[in-house]
Image: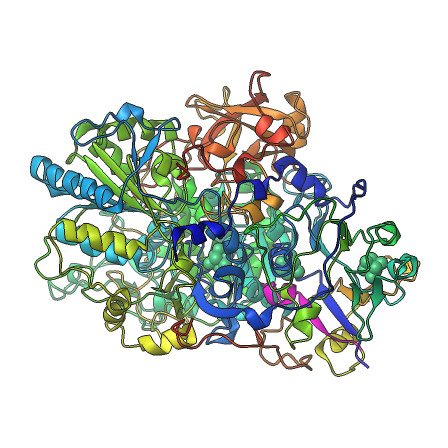
Amino acid sequence: MPMSEQDGVGVSRRSVLLSAGAAAGMLGLGGHSALQSLTRDETDAAVEGLFDETQVLNTACAPNCRGKCPLNVHVRDGQIKFVEPQMTDDERYRRGCLLGQSHVQRVYSPKRLKYPMVRADWEPGAPNPGGRGEDARFEQVSWDDALQYVADEMRRVRSEYGPESVFFHTGSGDNGMGTTLFGRLASMFGGTQQSWSIDSNVGVGFNRITGHGFFLPPTNESADWVNANTIIVWGSDLFKSQFQNDASKVLDAIESGAKLVVVDPVYTTTASKADLWLPIKPGKDTHLALAMIHTVLADGSYDDAFLRERTTAGALVRDDTDEMLRMRDLEGDADDDRVVGIHAETGEPVPLEPDTYAEIELFGEYEVDGIRATTGLSLLEDHVADYSPETVASVADLDPADIKTAARWLATRGPGGIAPSYALGRYKYGHVFGQTYAILLALTGDYGKSGTIHAQHPAGTTLNSGEYGSPDGAPGTQSLSMHEVPAALEDGEPFPIKAIYGMESNMLANQFPNRQRWHDLLENVDMFAMADFHRTPTVQHADIILPAAHWFEREDITDAWGSHPHISHRTKAHEPLWDARDDYHIIAELADKLGYDDLFLDDKRAELRKIASNDDRFDFDELRRKGNVRVEDEAAGIKYTDPFPTDTGRIELYDEDHPVEDDGTVLDLPRPIEDRTATDHDLADEYPLLFMQKHSKWRIHSQWADNAMVRKFNAEPTLDIHPSDARERGIDDGDYVRVYNDRGEVVVRASYNEGMRPGLINIDQGWWTDDYVHGSHQDLTHMEVNDLAPTFAFYDVRADVEPAPETIDTSKYTAPESADWLEGYPNGGDN
Amino acid sequence: MTDYGMVIDLERCIGCNACAVSCSQENNVSLDKQWNRILTEGGDAMDTPEGSYPENGRDGTLSMNHLPLACQHCDNAPCVKVCPVNATYKRDDGIVEIDYDKCMGCRYCMSACPYNARVFNFDEPKTLPTDGTGNVEERKQGVVEKCTFCSHRVEEDLDPACTVACPADARIFGDLDDEESTASRYVEKYETEQLLDELETDPNTYYIRGEMSPGRTRSGNELEGTEKKAVGNPNGVATDGGDGQ
Ligand code: SF4
Ligand code: SF4
Ligand code: SF4
């Protein structure tokens, strides 16, 4: 399509002059209607459908919310008009949320990138990194020039510093094949790729006990959730974020009699549906799980058959070494490292095999061959004596009877489980919670059955791409965890990073904690290229801007990790707008310029077919035809039916590795550790409020922040605050306030919310820096991580709030004519 | 006869706004207007509760619910009665619709409607893309508009956009004159409410409150009377992976 026509697709700025402030009011969500004076014009005809001129194509949404929703897109006159959920191969999984159905406004966003651009004051050899940031100006260049700059800099950096100094950065912006393709190039080049320091906290603790989990542990596919009898949603508003596409599954469970328990300091939409809401004090989750263990043991309501068959509850732990007694410690084979229990009838030590019932004692202290030892369950029972429901209730500000009720429902009503979100891992020591609830679910026997639940996202399915990512002769990549990137940038440790190519990510300048520090860190880089389809704050921070195609503008395959058991297909609904290009063609041309001309085929479909051929569960042509295919996946269905991948093949209640955290706490058994949530934390007096940034239904991370349909409902960032905290500080509902701490500040409008726990404040995550009248919520966050599962602790933050200074210019929201979030940037590709 | 109506289960509704957005997209509604609004029954701000936060874990009085609200397609519709030019009328199939050619923008109907279901195109409609969205023509400045039960879809034997969009299975659309329709069976079986029934507008929209109804994706739901509608487009989805575009 020629460019002029493309422009005709019509994203004129005039067209969207909509006042952000007025929009929300005009919707009358509170029930008011504003009568306005009358103007007359000629009118249109009555309702008539336009289906005859509309073509419907398959595609999929996959921004890492976990929905991975197959969608149908309606195209008319070469324009995308409407998006709705596609029927899935397995009908139980038809899904989609308001965001998936708002892609129309993403494709035609005024913030779409149109042309390749280079920062005006950047040139090879003279990067002038100080010129980056909000005021940077860009000049349009050809694709050839832009990619030549990138290739030349990559090669120069490789020869000066080594291949690992080129960082192939990806976020979680799109679950298509982009990352796979990019990984192939990175592997060929020998660059650095990033591993995760976000969300890998709770799962790591769970893994210490069960051998499963890094991100949240596996859980039964969502269609099975209806069989749960008790669902404890822990720290998650799952009806609002991440799980709402599967809401029907939890609702069906409730309708058929399940108890819904919600543990959350905030009265959320999910809490509003609960049979029991535990309004816990932030940071006390491990305490609560320990109190529930206490209850189950005190009641004797544990599942003793499960404990004997699938856990080390009855395995003896030596009093002298605090390690599990092994057959080799007795008169056995020196290689026999099976753990040992005491047979309940004979009193003899017997070896414990994976997944094999053994009639052993669960409690007690014994002497075997002169070695004194205690069962793991007795050690646990002793340990939780300090965490009675009464004690924990006073720490966590709960009622002890409610703690017991939650534990009893879980233990006595049949299969059920706990669905934590990633929020718990956004407190520094979230992994201890993972350890604790893994043990709790072992006591209640909630593994490996229909109706058991372990996380708020099911495993779904992953495309098997075989060796595609590591082609013959490729040197492979180095890996750096996100929290290790700062040292590489700043100190060159363990190696310097000097060039960055980023795609499907808005992390580096917007989403990572302590934003200002990342801006400083990036000054050490000579070349920063970003491929994206809209102008995020991270794109604005780059040297070279590569306009990518929206998902609907390219053919692709998406899988459904963390979600549902289908592979989906994306059809190209139209050519990429303006001069934008499919990431595939950007990467392929870059590969060409780097001298890897055979790495990718010219024809993307042929390349997709090649990738898909590694997965024998579906046929690519069938996938293209049907849009989505349910694949039979060993990973789907009921989880934890095989022996646990631990040394013993069992759930190991007692951790004989004695992991030690940075404060010296030994975690052979779960011990709560707190950072800033502790009431006696050093910063508690100066910054009495705990600050969190929950996920809302209006964005997936920072995606959709520029979406006109979404902004109609959620026009501007706000601070959720309990009226009592606000009044104490002289803040009225709707006032602009300054939220600040020792790192930074942000100015937003206060929004009274009776459902916020007093002492806890929230700004929804994902807002772009440009959406604030001043600062950013990531100016409040820090990068301190734990030792055992290092992850950014986005919610472990203290702050205080005061009325905003009069000098702050709030006109972008308060002056009715301006609607900054719908306007193009001054040099956003128009030039 | 056919009498289209909708059942909305407020126990299932999670206030996610998927239906609200889908409605606006499909019906080409201006970005500063909304036909289908998800009201929060609770605090002043959207998605906030009323009441007080518990102390020591107990005795809180917080409560919050969501109420999706659009035209109720009243049988005894005040809007129809007041329209001086008969632009607003009740169709034989129960849908209350507006003839935009006849509407002269007097807005009597807006004052008459007790549900605040109607919006007035005071300005030029604003959509992104500017050529409009969805599968119906844009209404011009100066007319009143509102939910049509997606009559253009219903005529093609599709469910309304909101019903397809709802991830909670909270919405059921169907023929209330047909006792065997799923919608009728739900109304029959569950305690339902017609909003502001004291005004005797007799809406065709029924809200379930109190006891949750089963979702339509659940297998073996004995209330299933109507076959599930196809999704997409009466002309079908391209099955050639888009090659035929
Ligand atoms: S944002 Fe997530 S839940 Fe919503 S439609 Fe897209 S993939 Fe589905
Ligand atoms: S809800 Fe309002 S607009 Fe709809 S039929 Fe009833 S009175 Fe008329
Ligand atoms: S889509 Fe369904 S659950 Fe969501 S707001 Fe609408 S009716 Fe409620």
The quadrant holding residue B234 is bottom right
Count of numbered circles on the image: 0
Task: Determine if residue A201 is in view.
Answer: yes
Q: Is A606 placed above or below A490 here?
A: below
Q: Nearer the viewer, residue A659 or A95?
A: A95
| Residue A748 horizontal/vertical position (percent) | 56, 29
Highlighted magenta segment, given as a residue range:
B162-176
Residue at image point 28% right, 34% down: A543
Give the x, y percent position of residue A620: 32, 75
Q: Where, quadrant-wise, is the C terminus of chain B in this rendering?
A: bottom left
- Along the viewing direction, whichever of B231 and B12 lies nearer the viewer: B231
Magenta-colored stretch includes residue B165: yes
Image height of B104 relative to A495, above or below: below
Task: Report x, y in % for residue A538.
Answer: 36, 37
Q: Position of residue A331 (x, y in %)?
A: 14, 64
> Which quarter of the rendered picture does the N terminus of chain B lie within?
bottom right
Front-lying residue, A145 or A727: A145
A669 falls in the magenta region:
no
- Towards the viewer: A795 or A380: A795
Does residue A370 appear anywhere in the picture?
A: no
Q: What residue do we see at 14% from left, 66% from top?
A: A332
Q: From the viewer's perspective, is B90 left or right of A735?
A: right
Picture colour scheme:
rainbow
